[in-house]
Image (cartoon, helix red, strand yellow):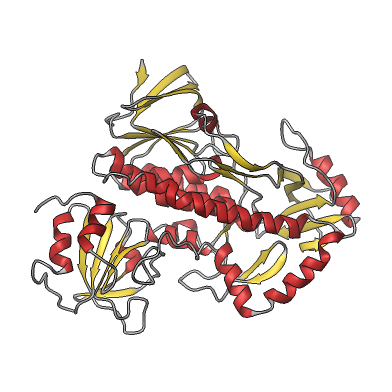
Amino acid sequence: MAEKASGTDPGTRVIVVGAGPVGLMLAGELRLGGAGVVVLERLPEPTGESRASQLNSRTMEVLDQRGLVEALGGTEPTGRGHFGGLALDASRLPGRYPGYWKIPQFRTEATLRTWASGLGADIRAGREVRALAAGDDGVEVTADGPGGPLRVSGSYLVGCDGADSTVRRLAGIGMRGTAASRELLRADVAGLEIPDRRFERFENGLAIAARRGDGVTRVMLHEFGRTAARRSGPPDFAEVVSGWARITGEDISSGTPIWVDAFDDASLQATRYREGRVLLAGDSAHVQLPAGGQALNLGLQDAANLGWKLAAQACGRAPAGLLDTYHDERHPVGEQVLANVRAQAHLLLGGPEVEPVRAVMREMLALPECNDRLAATVGGLDVRYEDGGHGLVGGRMPHCDLVTGSEHTSTTRLLHPAKGVLVDLSGEDASPGGPGSPQAIAAHWGDRVRVVPAKTGSDGPLRGLGAVLLRPDGHVAWTTPDGGDLRAALSRWFGPPATT
């Protein structure tokens, strides 16, 4: 008998496999879109490990669009980033969140878990998926649970279960790219008194050490020429100790390991992000060296793109082809990120032979234009899904303060409910106008698109525009005067009008 999800119609239910940050972000997005959600997580409880510790500018914007930044807890950004271990200044990035936020993954995960649960996502720990069956009408997964095997049915299934994704394997989706050739070791260690090291290169290898505010030191190391090992589990701390000593000459054996891990420079991408009713997001869809935290950030941005589209599909209101735009938009972004990460891996993990390339890159990054271009790439701010008649179309909507009547709001706050938004900037007291006005046209999509008459400053990103249509993920779908046909844009992203 299939296990029942509390109060959820299987026809509108989405099964998410994996309760890491990406799966939880997706679960919250789906709930905001009206879909039922069951999250199946293999582990019985969160690990508390801080695998990824950095959120980039675009991810902070995405979290801000859902009102989640404050819930992450107080943290100050740093403008100090890197590209392949070479200094990169991100303090001049455009937008509300220039720089990088050092937030351990367990805190990001806990914040998203609370948010998704509060929205009604059904999160079930200790459920390891063993089989799936997908047909024309839905999907069913079989998983091992505390009480024995169970089956859960739904309309769609999303694998957010990591680089060794069971969902990807069961769905028969292949990976393309290059296998691992080099390995790094890392550990969180308490009780260490060693100097901080920022991508410090020695004769035998690379060493990184950063002491956190709680007294725990993150150490990472790579011995030049060391090939990726075939491992069935994490390395012993003794391996980290011996490698650190060979590289730096320091003895860190007196420290207490909290967590030890190994990772490598594999660069692989799923050949497709959707196979019928099965989709992939995060590390299930792409595997890369986590340079600059791009792996986690890429995955969270996958979830923001997919969530509103899949919710519309599951609830029966999506226009034809909407769900296919997830692969069409995110697969090229994944390709671009993997390409820049491969370049970083060459700079970071190469031995003495890469020093001439590093010297040239260092000179280039001293030029503000080169620095800012790469900082925007690593920060996720250069993503543009299409070229439209106006420069904003297809790109992210920068934060912009607005006045609606006597109230102050912003484009960011208007996106909190994860619905489409048409901002009419034709005047402080803008009225719906005639049947051809943006407000009057958008009113026919009023159940999916909020219409907001507002005014903004003369020097902001909306300067000179009469109206702008925002997708739920914060990307611009249409603008006036030169963004094309508003009816076509509304129909493309939100389906047919509810009224005529």
User: Looking at the picture, does residue 402 appear above or below residue 290?
Assistant: below
Task: Examine the image and state in which quarter residue 263 appears.
Answer: top right
Residue 144 in view in this figure: yes
Extreme-bottom residue of the structure: 458
Residue 104 in view in this figure: no
Q: Quadrant of the C terminus?
A: bottom left
> Which percent across, then down, holds residue 456?
29, 79
> Which percent across, then down, holds residue 431?
11, 73
Considering depth in this image, is 115 or 243 the residue closer to the camera?
243
Task: Examine the image and state in which quarter residue 274 appears.
Answer: top left
Considering depth in this image, is 385 or 484 the residue closer to the camera?
484
Considering depth in this image, is 432 or 385 the residue closer to the camera?
385
238 sits left or right of 432 in the view: right
372 sits left or right of 486 in the view: right
> Which residue appears at 75% of the width and 52% of the height?
220
> Which residue appears at 11% of the width and 69% of the height?
432
> Which percent across, then down, holds residue 330?
47, 51
> Which residue appears at 32% of the width and 54% of the height?
418
Q: Quadrant of the N terminus?
A: top left
> Which residue appears at 76% of the width and 72% of the height?
360
